Structure formats: structure tokens, C-alpha cells
Amino acid sequence: MNFKPLRAWRIKAFLCDIVAAATNAKEAEPLLARWYSWVRRCRLEPMKQVAKILNAFDSQLTNGSVEAVNGRIQAAKAKVRTTAPSVI
């Protein structure tokens, strides 16, 4: 039998229980750590991807600096397009 859907449902249900039961971050933190540990070991790639996304909220890392560099590159490309002579 294929128990992957059942495992995925149990993982989702446990996360829903945490959200419903925890009244503050201090209560939720150990439960979420347990949930995260379970998901990282579950061998279900879609669930692992969800755990990575949720972990990104906690890490406080952003891609702001990368976006700033990208904006400068795009501005430089636009400037070159407008100032370069057309060759046809």
C-alpha cells in the first residue's frame, strides 16, 4: 500500500493543530520545532519544500541586495539601448 498521502495528511493535520492550539509564539516554538524535524525526515519532497518555505520566514534573510544589483543591471541595459546607435 502507498502510505505517502496518509503521512502527508498527518503532517498537515499536526501543523493545523499547532496553529489552533498555540496562543503565542512561546507556546508554538517547541511544537513547530518538532513539526519541522518530522517534516525534514519524512522523505516526502513536497512537504520538505513547505518546511523550507516556513523556515525562510524565521531566518530573516532577504534577497534585497540581489534585487538592488539586478535593478542596477537592468537600468544600465536600458541606458545602453537608448544611447547606442542603431545598426541595421
Image (cartoon, grey):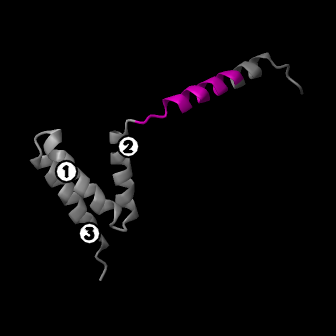
Whole-angstrom CA distance, mark 3 to mark 1, is 21 Å
Image coords of residue 15 (percent x, y): 21, 54
Q: Residue flagged by tag 3: what amino acid is it?
A: Arg
Bounds of the magenta segment? 61-76
| Earlier-in-chain disc, 3 versus 2 | 3
Relative to residue 30, is residue 59 drawn left or right?
Answer: right
Relative to residue 4, is residue 74 drawn left or right?
Answer: right
Whole-angstrom CA distance, mark 1 to mark 2, is 17 Å
Examine the rendered structure and indicate whether residue 41 appears above or below residue 22: below
Q: Mark 3 points at which residue?
A: 7
| Magenta part, dominant SS | helix
Q: What secondary structure is marked by label 3?
A: helix
User: Which quadrant: the C terminus?
Assistant: top right
Q: Residue flagged by tag 1: what amino acid is it?
A: Pro
Q: Mark 2 points at which residue?
A: 56
Give the residue displayed 33% in from the left and 67% down from the top: 42
Q: Name the residue under label 1.
A: 30
